[in-house]
Amino acid sequence: MNLYTIIQLIIVSIGATTAMTLFSYAMSKSFRELYKEPVLLGYVLKKTHISLSEKSQKTWGWLIHYIIGFLFVVGYHIVWAKDIVPISPLGAILLGVISGVIGIISWVFMFKLTSQQPPIDFNGYYIQLFFAHIIFAIVATLLYTLF
């Protein structure tokens, strides 16, 4: 991968992760539930007894969230470059569905790692997470085609 591609993937991942996060924050506010991935990542860090200050937990929650977004975009780039999934609206939705399933399974696993579950509506969280990943994939596809 050349430097231009890496920069492209960083920009695409920042845009897509931000769009997804804005959606999750809007859903969190609309339903008065905790659906904020960076906050929940900080919660998971806290409950795994990793010795971090509260501020560091929040910072790491955000950083991990954006790193995971970058890794998803790298995966998208690979399937696009190898012509496994077309760069198209239908391809974006397919990648979003796959990403949503991966995201839900990952969160189920992460919540199992903690000794105490966060006080959230898990079904509601997983439903909004699924749609947040579809938004992520659509925005990633749009931004990728612009570069």
Image: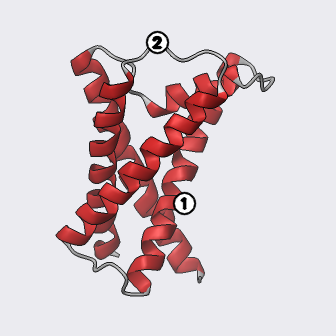
Query: Which residue is located at x 46 percent, y 33 percent?
Result: 37
Residue projecting furthest to the bottom: 82
On the image, which quarter does residue 54 sit in? top right
Q: Which residue is mark 2?
A: 119
Picture residue at 33% right of the left edge, 33% below the top: 24
**How many numbered tags mark residues here?**
2
C-alpha gap between disc 2 and disc 1: 28 Å
Task: Tell me where residue 142 appears, x and y as whole percent.
Answer: 26, 66
Q: Is residue 90 left or right of residue 136?
A: left
The picture places residue 25, in percent across and down from the top left corner, at 33, 28
Depth check, mark 2 against mark 1: the one in front is: 2
Identify which residue is drawn at 59% across, 78% down. Answer: 3
Q: Horizontally, is 137 left or right of 2 in the view? A: left
Neighbor class of circle 1 (other Cα within 10 Å; few <14, some 14-19, many 20+) is: some
Q: Quadrant where the C terminus lies?
A: bottom left
Q: Nearer the viewer, residue 68 or 7?
A: 68
Which quarter of the figure has residue 86?
bottom left
Q: Provide the secondary structure element on which disc 1 rests.
A: helix
Residue sitting nearer the eye, 70 or 46: 46
Element marked by disc 2:
loop
For badge 1, the amino acid type reads Leu
Residue 71's disc is 1
Give the vertical position of 127 relative to 142 (above or below): above
